[in-house]
Each structure stands twice: as structure tokens, then as C-alpha cells.
Image: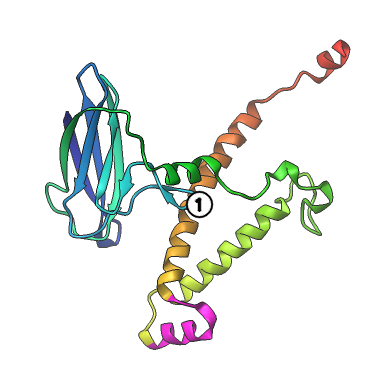
């Protein structure tokens, strides 16, 4: 197993490090690899739907690099950079063991809410918007909830202890719970943005031959 890594400090935050690891498997068989974080902090892994990607935990990554292939990993860590940032161990030929089943199920099932096209037309769109262009009500409701949590987080960010305490006493709840919720919201928003961008590009490329199909019907 061959590996290269790089470290970058997050802009404006020297105590947060972004780590990239490039793994290459020159052998003709899939091989399992264990990448351990060497920085003085827990791994903040990539997430989907608020769940760490398969193979990740707070200590690092364990997974498979395909035969004669490569795999690039990236994560953040709330600690200053140091070299090397990771330890890479080749665990040999990949067996049949799979990733954590629960985390995989959450990622594959996705959001338990009904898809937008399952919502009755009367419920789509705001009171003032065009039903064809307005944000679906279910999505708008979720975004409003996320925005409310972000606003609570903003009120206790970079403020004095007294101000933060007053904000929390005013109904912002437990600070650790709020931090976890906002972190999960950020991951979910990123995933939604990526999927929306991909779907937008696909939708823009669609050109249904309406007239031709009508002649065939």
C-alpha cells in the first residue's frame, strides 16, 4: 500500500487542521487499510445525513482500496497540524467483512420524510409564491427549522460567557446538544446542495420530445 498525505490549517483557525490522504493499491487484489489519526484531537469525518461515511470513527478510517486502484480520504481535526498527521497500516487482502450496518442503512434510507412528489399539490408552495417555482412546503419547513437552530448558534458564537449564558437561559437549550444539531445540519445542507446541483444539471439537460411522443400516442 502506498500513501501520500497533506495538511492545511483552516483559514483563520490555526487550531483546526484539514487532512488529505491519497491511498494507492498497486496489487491485483483488493486490500484493507487502516488509517489512524495522529493529531491531538478527534477526527471530524465526512458525513451524509448526519451520519459519518462508512468506515469512519473518531480515531480514523478503516476500509478497502480496490485492486490496482486508489482512494482519497479527507477529514478535519480540531488540533494544530503536525507531521505525519496519520499512520497507515495495510491489513492485507480484503475479506468479506462490511462496514457498520446501522450507519449504512441510515445513509441508504436517507430522509424518512415523503418525497416532494408525494405531497398533494395544494400543499406545495407558499401562500404568495408560484407553485411551480416555490420551495415545496416540506422542504421550507425543514429549512426554517435548520435556520432557527443556526440563529441560536450564531447568538452564542464569539460572545462573552455572560451573553452566552443569557442566550441559553433564554431557551437555546443545552450547548453541547445545540452544537451537535448544527453540525448535523451543516452536513445535511451540504449533501442536499450537492444533490440539488446534480439534479439541476440533469433537469436542464432534459429535452422531452413532446410533439413526437404525442404523434406516437
Q: Relative to residue 91, is residue 44 depicted above or below?
A: below
Provide the major secondary structure of the magenta segment: helix
> At 74% from the left edge and 22% from the top edge, which residue is drawn?
208
Residue 166 place in picture, x, y as percent: 46, 87
Residue 26 place in picture, x, y as percent: 20, 20
> At 55% from the left edge and 42% from the top edge, which residue is drawn?
109
Q: Is residue 87 left or right of residue 8?
A: left
| Quadrant placement of the C terminus | top right
Residue 4 place in picture, x, y as percent: 18, 35
- Which residues are the magenta region? 162-174
Between 159 and 92, which is closer to the camera in this rendering? 92
SS at circle 1: helix
| Quadrant placement of the N terminus | top left
Residue 164 place in picture, x, y as percent: 42, 82
Instruction: Name the residue furthest front.
Output: 96
Binning the other alpha carbons within 10 Å of mark 1 as few (below 14), some (14 to 19) or many (20 upward) gives: some
> At 44% from the left edge and 41% from the top edge, which residue is drawn?
104
> At 64% from the left edge and 26% from the top edge, which residue is drawn?
205
Residue where numbered disc 1 is placed = 188
Does the magenta portion include 173?
A: yes
Instruction: Name the residue furthest left.
Output: 83
Q: Is residue 51 left or right of residue 6?
A: right
Residue 13 figure quarter: bottom left
Amino acid at each position: 500500500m502506498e500513501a501520500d498525505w497533506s495538511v492545511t490549517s483552516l483559514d483563520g483557525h490555526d487550531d483546526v487542521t484539514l487532512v488529505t490522504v491519497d491511498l494507492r493499491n498497486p496489487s491485483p487484489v483488493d486490500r484493507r487499510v487502516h488509517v489512524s489519526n495522529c493529531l491531538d484531537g478527534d477526527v471530524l469525518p465526512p458525513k451524509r445525513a448526519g451520519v459519518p461515511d462508512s468506515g469512519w470513527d473518531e480515531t480514523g478510517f478503516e476500509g478497502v482500496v480496490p485492486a490496482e486502484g486508489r482512494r482519497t480520504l479527507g477529514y478535519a481535526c480540531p488540533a494544530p497540524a503536525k507531521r505525519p498527521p496519520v499512520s497507515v497500516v495495510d491489513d492485507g487482502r480484503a475479506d468479506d467483512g462490511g462496514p457498520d450496518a446501522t450507519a449504512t442503512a441510515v445513509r441508504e434510507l436517507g430522509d424518512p420524510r415523503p418525497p416532494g412528489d408525494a405531497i398533494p399539490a395544494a400543499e406545495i408552495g407558499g401562500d404568495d409564491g408560484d407553485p411551480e417555482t416555490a420551495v415545496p412546503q416540506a422542504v421550507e419547513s425543514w429549512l426554517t427549522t435548520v435556520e432557527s437552530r443556526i440563529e441560536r448558534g450564531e447568538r452564542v458564537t464569539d460572545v462573552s460567557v455572560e451573553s452566552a449564558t443569557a442566550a441559553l437561559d433564554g431557551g437555546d437549550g443545552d450547548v453541547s446538544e445545540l452544537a451537535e444539531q448544527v453540525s448535523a445540519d451543516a452536513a445535511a445542507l451540504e449533501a442536499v446542495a450537492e444533490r440539488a446541483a446534480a439534479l439541476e444539471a440533469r433537469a436542464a439537460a432534459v429535452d422531452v420530445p413532446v410533439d413526437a411522443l404525442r404523434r406516437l400516442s
